[in-house]
Structure formats: C-alpha cells, structure tokens
Image (cartoon, coloured by chain):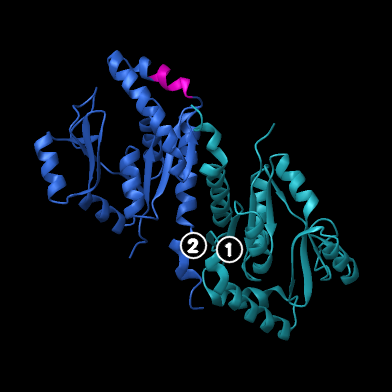
Chain colours: A cyan, B blue
Amino acid sequence: MSEQGLLIVVSGPSGAGKSTVISKVMSDDPSCVFSISATTRPPRGTEQNGVEYFFVDRERFESMIKSGELLEYAEYVGNYYGTPKAPVFESLNRGKNVIFDIEVQGAMQIKQKCPNAALIFIVPPSFSEIEKRLRGRHTDSESKILQRLETARSEYAQAINYDYIVINDDPQKAANEVKAIISAEKCRVEFRKKYVLEV
Amino acid sequence: MSEQGLLIVVSGPSGAGKSTVISKVMSDDPSCVFSISATTRPPRGTEQNGVEYFFVDRERFESMIKSGELLEYAEYVGNYYGTPKAPVFESLNRGKNVIFDIEVQGAMQIKQKCPNAALIFIVPPSFSEIEKRLRGRHTDSESKILQRLETARSEYAQAINYDYIVINDDPQKAANEVKAIISAEKCRVEFRKKYVLEV
C-alpha cells in the first residue's frame, strides 16, 4: 500500500504567476497531480474543459453544491469556483500529492476540513508587479483590472493565515521552493509517527 | 542587512547516523553553520577540541551553567552537554542557519526558548538497526551499549514532540530531506510576513 498523499493548496493574487509555478512543479515532480476545479467563468485563451477547469453553468454548479459533491467552493469576481471531492480522495489514496490552485475562501475551507493540508501563498516580489502583470496580460477590461487589484489587496491581508509564502521573482526558483515545501511536509511527524511508535 | 537565520535542531538515537547526515548538509549548503556544543565527555576517535565539541571538565561546565552562558544543557549518559549562547546568536544575525546536534532534553529547551526553531528527529529505517550500528562502531563497552539502547527507546518516545522525522536509510537522501526542510522553513509565513503586510 502506498503512503497517503498530501494536499497542497496554492493561492495568490491574479498576476502572481501561480499557474506557471504550478506547471513547473507538476512537470518536475511526477508524484503531484493537479486538482481540476469546476467553474462558471468562461474559458480564457487556450483553456480546455477538463484540463484547466471543468467549465459548467450556474445551474449545474448549484446542483453540485446541493448534492455535497464539492470539497470547497466560493464565489469570486462574479463566478463560482469549486473542487469536486471524489477525484481528490482517489488521488490521495493512490499516494499522489494533490495540488489545488484556489482562492483564499476555498483555501480556508480546505484547511478547516483537512488540517494537514499545506497552504502556500504565492506573491510577486512587490505589489506593484501585480498591476503590471495584469495589464500585460491583455485579457481583462479596465474595470475588471481595478476589481482584481482590489481583490488582490484583500487577499494579501489573509496571507497571514497560510503556512508558507513563496516569492515569485523567478518561476523556477519559486517552483523549487514549492517542491522543497512538499518534501518537507512529507517528513512532518504527523505523517511519520509509525517510524517512532511502539519500538 | 541579511535575513535572520534559522535554528535547526537535529536529534536522534546513537547509531542513527546523525553526524554523517549533518556533515553532508553542511557541505552542500554554505548558509549552514554547525553549533559546537560544550561537553564533559572525553573525545572519541578523531574528534578535536573546537571542531566537534568544546571539551571541558565538570567544574568549567558548572561555572558556565551558573553564569548563564548556555542556551540549553543536559546530562546524558553520565556527561554534560550544552550550547554556548553567544556564537549562536551571532551566526543567526549574520543570516546563517545554525544546526544543532543535541539530545532530546536540550531540543525541548531550545523549542521553548525559540518557538520558530525547526526540530528534526533522525532515525534509522528500523529500531534493530540501532543495535547493529552501535555494535559495529566498536567504541563502547557492552554495558554502555545496553545503556544507549535503553536511552534510545526513551528518546523514540519523545520524537512525537519534534516537527519532522527523517528516515536515514541513505545518508544523501536523508541530507536532501533536511535541506528541503530548511528551504521550506525559510518560506514559513512567520519569516516572510513583510512581503504581504501593508500593501
């Protein structure tokens, strides 16, 4: 039987470069799988259903909430985001580490339900980078950008409730820090009690 | 000004291979320095004064206790072991991570005084390895070996109060885990608050 996997929650403001860092971690570490969230927001750029997200309509999302299919969910900048439970627990039982890219409200729900989850908040080296990166992306309207900046500010205020802060000044360096966190968390006494009990 | 360093406490029963693992960590990671303990036990093998330990007599050790020069101290298998304070804080202020090789009582004293210290307990893959390694070392008498085994058993019982458990089935793999723990600990929110406060 393989060892139980780890839950790794990654949050961070839009423009922090989370997705790039997570992709690097995933490609470097085959023991990690990505938790695919369900969302009601429309696909962006090259995003595909079942790869970055499960894209569903509000009616379907609300029925998932009602039937208890979600580990966590939240409404964020006008859209629902949530994590279907079943595939997560299946991966953990196969010994896979499951990486979540979710926002602050969802992260806090996970921490409450799974206290051993490791919560990582990714930030750029300075707050002004966020505006620069959001504008450079050319996917959002001006009002959407201002709304995202305001949201980012309130997210920063909650970073203090996370376990780790990773500074993304270089995506590979940030990915290495996330990988170190995963290795370290696997050494936590909670996971390795069996090696010291009953000798 | 460099970032404040980290305290890393490494404990483990005699025969767990702690010293080898610590040497590997030290030679791989130049940001780590080794805290040299003072002890009243006689030098073993090639051990040199001021390298592995400061070797002092009981009278000198007891005067260090009285004058408050020690961060922690304990009596262990008939000898005193303790950590002189001054060089530790000097290294931390220069941004160095200070690694301590100390036994369980001392580790608990450090955790109490410095709650951000990372406590690592190193064990061999199974308890029977300890006896095998102790006998293979040919440095202790039979009664000393039996005493060390009994001590090891009571140390295992306290491993649960550590933060991490590292299994030393391969010294390089164990050293990599210790290095991952150090990297991860440097990312803890307690050390990186300044990146998310007051944006």
Residue ID for mark 1? A121
Report if residue A51 is visible in the image. yes
Q: Please tell me which residue is depicted at 81% across the width and 56% down the height of the picture.
A: A51
Say which mark, if any, is on residue A148. Answer: none
Residue A52 within the magenta-colored segment of the rendering: no
Which is nearer the eye, A115 or A87? Answer: A115
Q: Is residue A114 above or below residue B131?
A: below
Residue located beneath label 2 in the image: B189
Residue A172 placement (x, y as % from top left): 58, 54
Q: Is residue B147 left or right of residue B197?
A: left
- Answer whether residue B132 is magenta in the image: yes
Q: Is residue A113 above or below residue A153?
A: above
Q: Which residues are magenta?
A: B127-133
Query: Is A118 on the left or on the right of A26, as rendered?
Result: left
How far, Cα to Cα, is label 2 from label 1?
Answer: 9 Å
Identify whether A93 is placed above or below A145. above
Say whether residue A166 is left or right of residue A29: left
The amino acid sitting under disc 1 is: Phe
Q: Circle 1 sits in a helix, a strand or a loop, which is it?
A: strand
Farthest bottom residue?
A143
